[in-house]
């Protein structure tokens, strides 16, 4: 499909983060199973349904703002901890998202109409189909806008972006991390 597709090797696993990260999402626990940090799609049922990596060190007893129904406990939080590529380990008290005020970062310049990418919607849809079905790294969600395909993964140390740049060329796929450095 792209300039270096034959020589590119996709990352085998999600990369680990070198320090503390924060993720904003739903923490959900079914019965006695391990709690999960859901950073992707959430089914808006009651209780909600989602999946994500296991959270180590989570303590519902220390959380005031949560819901429980049908043996499922959940809430939405900014969660601080470490990411080893598969498991999230809590290092600080979570903050309910209703009370969390992250520092606003500058909008992605690729969303500015003055900085439109050169890929067509058809090209981006074809890439999106491959990315969401054939990549060993979990893609939480993806969308095309302004001539780019935006792809959100748990964490990218640059290796996932490098893979996409090799396969499709620069300025086609924009990788974003759901877990960001604190």
Image: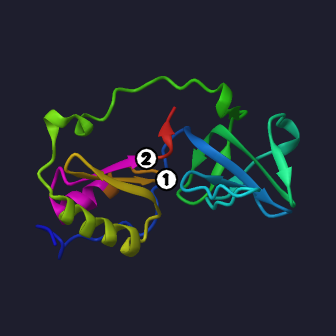
**Residue 8 image position (x, y, % from top left):** 23, 70
Classify 102 as above or below 180.
above
Residue that label 2 marks:
177
Picture quarter containing residue 50? bottom right
Q: Nearer the viewer, residue 74 or 153?
A: 74
**Residue 88 image position (x, y, % from top left):** 63, 51
Q: Is residue 93 magenta?
A: no
Q: Are marks 2 and 1 in contact (CB under 8 Å)?
A: yes
The N terminus lies in quadrant: bottom left
Q: Is residue 163 magenta?
A: yes
**Of marks 2 and 1, which one's residue comes earlier in the chain?**
1
Q: Residues within 10 Å of mark 2 (few under 14, many from 20)?
A: some
Classify 167 as above or below 85.
below
Could you say which disc has been placed on residue 168 in the image? none
Disc 2 from disc 1: Cα separation: 6 Å
What range is drawn magenta here?
A: 161-177
**Residue 108 image position (x, y, % from top left):** 30, 35
Q: Residues within 10 Å of mark 1 (few under 14, many from 20)?
A: many
Q: Residue at x 84, y 44 (%)?
A: 60
Residue that label 1 marks:
154
Label 2: element kind: strand
Left/right of residue 37 with respect to residue 127 in the rendered view: right
Classify 146 as above or below 80.
below
**Residue 31 image position (x, y, % from top left):** 85, 62
Left/right of residue 164 with respect to residue 97 in the rendered view: left
Q: Nearer the viewer, residue 174 or 144?
A: 144
Q: Residue at x 86, y 60 (%)?
A: 70
Q: Nearer the viewer, residue 141 or 113?
A: 113
Picture quarter containing residue 116? top left
Label 1: element kind: loop
């Amino acid at each position: 499909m792209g300039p270096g597709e034959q020589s590119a090797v996709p990352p085998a696993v999600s990369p680990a983060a070198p320090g503390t990260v924060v993720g904003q999402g739903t923490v959900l626990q079914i019965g006695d199973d391990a709690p999960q940090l859901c950073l992707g799609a959430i089914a808006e049922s009651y209780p909600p349904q989602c999946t994500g990596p296991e959270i180590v060190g989570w303590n519902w007893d220390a959380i005031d703002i949560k819901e429980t129904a049908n043996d499922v406990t959940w809430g939405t939080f900014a969660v601080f901890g470490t990411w080893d590529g598969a498991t999230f380990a809590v290092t600080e008290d979570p903050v309910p998202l209703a009370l969390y005020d992250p520092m606003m970062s500058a909008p992605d310049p690729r969303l500015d109409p003055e900085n439109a990418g050169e890929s067509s919607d058809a090209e981006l849809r074809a890439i999106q189909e491959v990315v969401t079905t054939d990549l060993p790294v979990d893609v939480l969600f993806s969308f095309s806008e302004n001539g780019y395909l935006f792809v959100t993964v748990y964490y990218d140390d640059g290796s996932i972006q490098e893979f996409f740049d090799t396969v499709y060329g620069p300025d086609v796929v924009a990788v974003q991390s759901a877990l960001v450095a604190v």
